[in-house]
Image (cartoon, grey):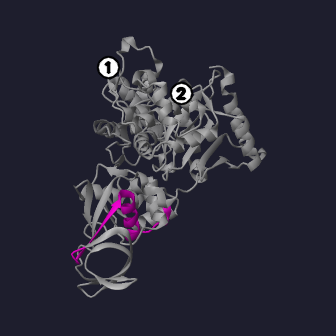
Amino acid sequence: MRASRYASAIVLMALLLTDQARASSDATVAWLRDGAVQIRALTGALPAHETANVFARNKVPLGSLWKLFVYAYLSDTRAQEPAYLCAAKSSVTDSEERYCCQPGDTVDRDTALARSCAPYFSARRLGIGESAWQAYWMPRTRASWLLDLSALQAATEVPLDELLAALAAIAPGARTEARRAMLDIGFNGYGRDAWTRLGTGIRYKTYSWHKNDGSAVGGAAGWLADGTPFWFAAKGASRAALTTWASQLASVLPEPRQNKLDADDTSCVDVDFFARYPLQAVWQENPSRLIAQGELKGRYRLLFANGQWLRFTAESDMTLESGSLIRGRFGMNEYVARVIDREGRAQPVQAARALAIAARSYLLQNAHFEGGCWHINDSSQTQRVSPNPPSEGAKAAAAFTDQIILNGVAVHYHRVAAGNNRMAWQDAVVRATGGWDFERILNVSFPEATFATLNGRSECARLNAAELWLAEKAPRWQTKLNQEPGYEALDATPKICALADGHPYSDQQRMRIYVRGWRSLDERVTLAHEYLHLALRFHPNGASEDYIEALARQLIGG
């Protein structure tokens, strides 16, 4: 592409920054809410008149976001297109196919969106005609670029306000399916280094716009947890942009509107309340009357067989059955929020997020799945559930950790008593108050666990045999490594995760190693190399690839 194609994107980003921010910010975010577009440089807000000028004069590159609109069309029209078959290696002619699948493998619609597989969404391959495309989109948008199939390509530049409006126009069902597919982008894809700061309630499609001079503009666009469409751009490719700006982006984006969080929550949980405490009578308070069964809505007063009383509020999501059983049906995130309010509290935020993941994990490990819903008792023998509507803070913690569970261990928690694979809420509060985030809190409480999603995808596919090999070798290396300034023996063998794509690397924040394997000589040198990056992170040459590689080869050869 010619450099001029990137001019308006660069000009847009420049105009979006105030004089004070120009020297310190290279990133911009925008969102659409209540019919109004809001734009922020990640160091401040734009004046209203400058916002208007930006929209009047500038456009942004569509990049790979065009695939999201084809996905929405296929989803909402209930298309039954064939999977995409990647060509044999010797016959690959499309460089875009490298994102799709291994030679000879196939990819489905959701995976194609998560991997940004352009050939999958080709209108010609899918047999999408201009007339059918326009008939679908005309009632939803007046954007000329979206009505023109030939404009659906990375080089197309579009007004930012029209792009946000087009995202808002995607049908709710298609948006729900796209959000489900895009979870993998933020959790395992290009957003994997940012997800603990952005959360998983936000879902997005990434894009990168590479210039001929080697520089790039990248970012993401999608929806917040309540369906608010947003767009983000920064210098650099999408993964680097998200990693660099995740904390600022999380602080600038608006809080999701809590009353809209259940729209995409298709999982349900049935709760039998007060399972260990038989009910004697149920009174509705306004109007005051004794009730025997039926839907509960409003304020109620309960008398238990042991003589205890309890007042609570119901919102048509609970029923009294035969005068003795109160059952509620909630979306997964509302259930988790009710557990947070009952077993802990919504503050501090990082402790609440840790409890949200623990509660969700416990549910899946201990509840019964029947009739399309999870079924569990409200009991101190399982986990307790608040009968009252959840607090806004608890709902926010549940939405931020949407779909995330702990994998690989039996999850338990207690108010004060920590133990093996048991988190103490009291300890979580102390750690969160001390600046720990939810990931670190959970890693200490459940050291053998990894994070995963409800659909079974894990952010670390453990290479257990490689960990055993490293645990055996590392002590033997210490005699030599003790001579290296800045060497610090690791407290435990780092988790070794299977690398799906890209180059091997070590994550010093999480103390993990990502490699493809460990069996061959080259793979073992690579594993030792990444281990040294962790063990020598305080060494004066600990970031030197040449120094680390030479030392790794000495260790493996010795």
Residue at image point 56% right, 51% down:
250
Residue 47 seen in this snapshot? no
Give the residue at the far bottom of this rendering.
307
Q: Earlier in the sequence, mark 2 or mark 1?
A: 1
x, y (%) of residue 320? 27, 73
Q: Amino acid at mark 2?
A: Leu
Please state if 38 lies on the left or on the right of 224 as rendered: right
Screen quadrant of the N terminus:
top right
Q: Position of residue 413 (x, y in %)?
A: 33, 63
Amino acid at dot 1: Gly
Q: Residue at x 25, y 53 (%)?
A: 372
Under circle 2, the secondary element is loop
Between the C-alphas of marks 2 and 1, the distance is 27 Å
Nearest the camera: 520 or 283?
283
Instruction: Find numbered disc 1 in the image and state the secondary structure of the residue it sits on.
Output: loop
What are the residue bounds of the magenta stretch?
A: 321-350
Instruction: Determine whether 231 is above or below 340 in the image.
Output: above
Tell me, for residue 104, which label it has, or none. Answer: 1
Q: Which mark is residue 152?
A: 2
Residue 414 visible from this viewpoint: yes
Q: Magenta span has 332?
A: yes
**Residue reaching furthest to the right:** 19
Give the image quarter of residue 212: top right
Which is more toward the observer, 88 or 263? 263
